Amino acid sequence: MATERTAATLVLRLAGAGLTAAMAAIHLRLWAEGYRDLVTIGPLFLVNGVIGILLAAALLVTPVRGLAPVAAVSALFTAGTLGALVLSLTTGLFGFVESTGAELVRPTLYVEVAGVAVLATLAVTAHSHPHHRTHTRAGRSGGDHRTATPRR
């Protein structure tokens, strides 16, 4: 069972990092192809790309004990990016309105929806991973799992 959980965590970790990197790559490509000239939106696309790369790397190198918060932050970041895209498609965002017919809108929606789902699942899985629970218990009890008995 522990081996299956470890394998599942690895698959989720790789998928989450890949989806986060794909989201970053889309934003960096769009920034390079002209979005950089848009006030407010341009710099945000660059920041999104850079943060996405950093999060993808963190998802790959973080030990299992610290993976749950990294996955949770990545899921929230991806959800925020998805929310910004939905706003830009509906009411507009910082004066910019995106079209559903734009080249990368649909792939971006797929990558970000999948990213939120995979990263949220990874956060839960990593939180319940045996290495995480052992670390959490040790942190609360100072690393000693024995019950102290008073001396008389």
Image (spheres, rainbow, N blue to C red):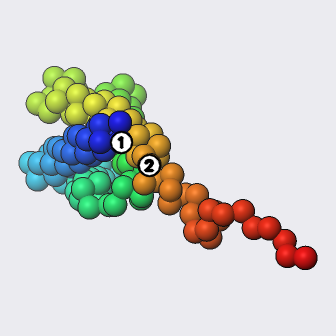
Residue displayed at 16% across by 23% down = 101
Q: Position of residue 137 (x, y in %)?
A: 58, 58
Q: Is residue 127 left or right of residue 146?
A: left
Q: Where is 25 relative to 88, above or below?
A: below
Dot 1 crowding, Cα within 10 Å, few <14, some 14–19, many 20+? few
- Can the viewer see residue 20 in this picture? no
Q: Is residue 29 left or right of residue 5?
A: left
Q: Is residue 76 left or right of residue 4?
A: right
Residue displayed at 11% across by 53% down = 32
Q: Where is 109 relative to 29, above or below?
A: above
- Can the viewer see residue 133 in this picture? yes
Q: Where is 107 relative to 80, above or below?
A: above
Q: Position of residue 84 (x, y in %)?
A: 37, 38
**Front one among 91 and 79:** 79
Residue displayed at 41% across by 59% down = 66
Q: Position of residue 143 (x, y in %)?
A: 58, 68
Dot 2 crowding, Cα within 10 Å, few <14, some 14–19, many 20+? some
Q: Quadrant of residue 107?
A: top left
Q: Are marks 2 and 1 in contact (CB under 8 Å)?
A: yes
* Label 1 secondary element: helix
**Front one among 104 and 68:** 68
Q: Amino acid at mark 2?
A: Pro
Where residue 130 is drawn, which disc sits there? Answer: 2
**Front one among 2 and 135:** 2
Query: What is the residue that sits farthest to the bottom in this orientation?
Result: 152
Q: How far separated are the C-alphas under marks 2 and 1?
A: 8 Å
Mark 1 or mark 2, which is nearer the start of the sequence? Answer: 1
Q: Amino acid at mark 1?
A: Ala
Where residue 2 is drawn, which disc sits there? Answer: 1
* Label 2 secondary element: helix
Where residue 32 is drawn, which disc sits there? Answer: none
Q: Quadrant of the N terminus?
A: top left
